[in-house]
Amino acid sequence: DPQVLSILLGVEGHEGLAEQTIFVAGHKVTTDPLAVPFSKGRNLLSIYSKKYLDTFEGDELEAKNARNRATVAEVSRLFKEGGNCFWVAPSGGRDRRNKESGNFEPAKFDEASVGLFLL
């Protein structure tokens, strides 16, 4: 999303807006080899999904929960600061291939993907 948004805004003469946008994404944008190049050089806050957290225990689970708390605290700080633009994938980044057509289609809006903003 960050790179595509930059291109689209650039075409419309708003290059600076994408550079200043804060992207909120799942943790895989910083660990998945395919996604990492598209996340470089962006204002990015990542968070572990509840579904993913259920796969960890003990110290590792606590570390990931601590990271989520830090992300939520940073989002709260940025909201209070004001003047920031956030981008959250409306489906939580879960676009998948349609089983019938074989084409990738945008996933339905998932309210939980923006639940972080109910501060």
Image (cartoon, rainbow, N blue to C red):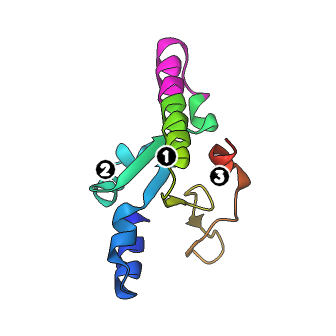
Q: Nearer the viewer's eye, disc 1 or disc 3?
A: 1
* Mark linked to residue 33: 2
Q: Quadrant of the C terminus?
A: top right
Q: What residue is drawn where x is 70% and y is 49%?
A: 112
- Label 1 amino acid? Leu
Q: Secondary structure at mark 1?
A: helix
Element marked by disc 2: loop
Of all residues, the one furthest to the right in this rendering is 111
Where is residue 118? Give x, y as percent.
Answer: 70, 45
Q: CA distance from mark 2 to mark 3?
A: 25 Å
Provide the residue designation for mark 1: 78
Q: Earlier in the sequence, mark 2 or mark 3?
A: 2
Q: CA distance from mark 1 to mark 3?
A: 16 Å
Sequence-first disc among 1 and 3: 1
Residue sitting at x 55%, y 45%: 80
Residue type highlighted by circle 3: Val
Question: Badge 1: how crowded within 10 Å, few (<14), some, or many (20+)?
Answer: some
SS at circle 3: helix
